C-alpha cells in the first residue's frame, strides 16, 4: 500500500487468559484470529496531510472460548464491525468510522438471523441504540478501544500521550473491565524498530483502589502484584511488518491475567 506505513494484508491474533495455579477449573481463555485487509482510500492529490482514509476488512474470523469454537449465530456478533471505513487522524491516531449506514445494514441482517435467540437479541438491541444515537461519543470510544484498532493505530508509540513533560505514559483501558490503569513507559527506537516497556504508575493508581477493583471484578483478595506491559513494532523498508502487545498481571503467587495482541504480515 503506497504512501502509508502499513502493508495491505496482516494476520491478527488476540489471546486473553486468566490462570489460577491452585484451581484450574477457574482458568479461562479467549482467542480471536482474523485476516486483515487495509485499503488506502485517500486521494494522493489531497493537500491535507494529517489524516488517512482506510477500508479495514476482516475475513476468516475465528473465535474460541476455553478451546471451544464459537459457532453461528453467536459468531455473527463478531462480524458486525468487520468492515469499517476509517478516518484516521495522523496527529493523535484516533479513528472515526464513517460508514455507519453500512454497519447498520449488516446489523439488520444479523438481527434477522438471531431473532429467536433472546440473549443475542438484547445485545444487538444495545448495539443498535449506540449506532443510532445522534451523539456518536460512545461509538467513537468503542471503535478506538477495540483490540485490533489499538494494536494497529492506537498503541502508545503512535498516540504519544504523555502524563507530563517529564513522564511518558498512557491509560490502559479494557485489560480489566471498568479499570483504567496508568502505565508509565520507556521507549527505545533502533533501526526503525520500536520497543516500549511499561509498569503501573503507583502515584496515579493508589494501591488500595487497585486492589478493591480487582476484588470487585474477580472476587480476589490480593495484596501484591507484578505488572508488565511490552510493545514491539518491527519495520522493514519503512513498512510495519508486525506489532505485538503483551500485557501480564500476576496477583500474589496464584493468579495471572495475560493478554497478547499481534498483527503480522500474512505472507
Image (cartoon, helix red, strand yellow):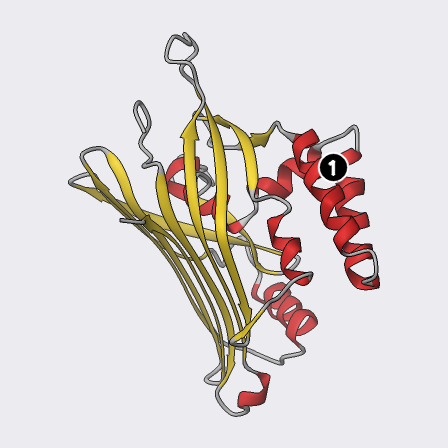
Q: Residue furthest left?
A: 191
Looking at the image, which is closer to me, 167 or 71? 71
Quarter of the view holding residue 212: bottom right
Determine the secondary structure under disc 1.
helix
Query: In the shown orientation, is residue 92 left or right of residue 143?
Result: left
Question: Is 129 situated above or below 52?
Answer: below
Quarter of the view holding residue 222: bottom right
Question: Is 226 situated above or below 115?
Answer: below
Quarter of the view holding residue 72: bottom right
Query: In the shown orientation, is residue 247 left or right of residue 86?
Result: left
Residue 170 visible somewhere in the drawing: no
Q: How far across and how far down the image is residue 190, in percent?
A: 17, 42
Q: How far across and how far down the image is residue 110, in percent?
A: 72, 49
Question: Is 171 situated above or below 42?
Answer: below
Query: In the shown orientation, is residue 156 left or right of residue 191?
Result: right
**Residue at image coords 57%, 46%:** 145
**Residue at image coords 76%, 30%:** 135
Looking at the image, which is closer to me, 223 or 13? 13
**Residue at image coords 49%, 31%:** 55
Looking at the image, which is closer to me, 67 or 171? 67
Q: How far across and how far down the image is residue 182, in percent?
A: 51, 52
Looking at the image, which is closer to me, 83 or 207? 83
Residue 207 visible somewhere in the drawing: yes
Disc 1 designates what residue?
Answer: 131
Amino acid at each position: 500500500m503506497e504512501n502509508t506505513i502499513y502493508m495491505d494484508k496482516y494476520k491478527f491474533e488476540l489471546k486473553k487468559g486468566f490462570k489460577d495455579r491452585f484451581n484450574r477449573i477457574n482458568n479461562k481463555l479467549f482467542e480471536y484470529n482474523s485476516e486483515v485487509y487495509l485499503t488506502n482510500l485517500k486521494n494522493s492529490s489531497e493537500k491535507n496531510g494529517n489524516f488517512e482514509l482506510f477500508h479495514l476488512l476482516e475475513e476468516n474470523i475465528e473465535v474460541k472460548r476455553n478451546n471451544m469454537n464459537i459457532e453461528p449465530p453467536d459468531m455473527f456478533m463478531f462480524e458486525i464491525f468487520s468492515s469499517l471505513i476509517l478516518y484516521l487522524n495522523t496527529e493523535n491516531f484516533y479513528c472515526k468510522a464513517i460508514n455507519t449506514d453500512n454497519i447498520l445494514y449488516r446489523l439488520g441482517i444479523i438481527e434477522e438471523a438471531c431473532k429467536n435467540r433472546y440473549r443475542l437479541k438484547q445485545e444487538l438491541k444495545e448495539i443498535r441504540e449506540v449506532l443510532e444515537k445522534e451523539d456518536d461519543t460512545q461509538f467513537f470510544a468503542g471503535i478506538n478501544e477495540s483490540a485490533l484498532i489499538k494494536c494497529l493505530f492506537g498503541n502508545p508509540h503512535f498516540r504519544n500521550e504523555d502524563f507530563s513533560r517529564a513522564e511518558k505514559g498512557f491509560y490502559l483501558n479494557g485489560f480489566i473491565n471498568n479499570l483504567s490503569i496508568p502505565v508509565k513507559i520507556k521507549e527505545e527506537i533502533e533501526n526503525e524498530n520500536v520497543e516500549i516497556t511499561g509498569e503501573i504508575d503507583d502515584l496515579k493508581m493508589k494501591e488500595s483502589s487497585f486492589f478493591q477493583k480487582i476484588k470487585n471484578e474477580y472476587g480476589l483478595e490480593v495484596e501484591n502484584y507484578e505488572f508488565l506491559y511490552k510493545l514491539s513494532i518491527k519495520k522493514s523498508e519503512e513498512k510495519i511488518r508486525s506489532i505485538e502487545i503483551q500485557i501480564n498481571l500476576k496477583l500474589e503467587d496464584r493468579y495471572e491475567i495475560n493478554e497478547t495482541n499481534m498483527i503480522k504480515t500474512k505472507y
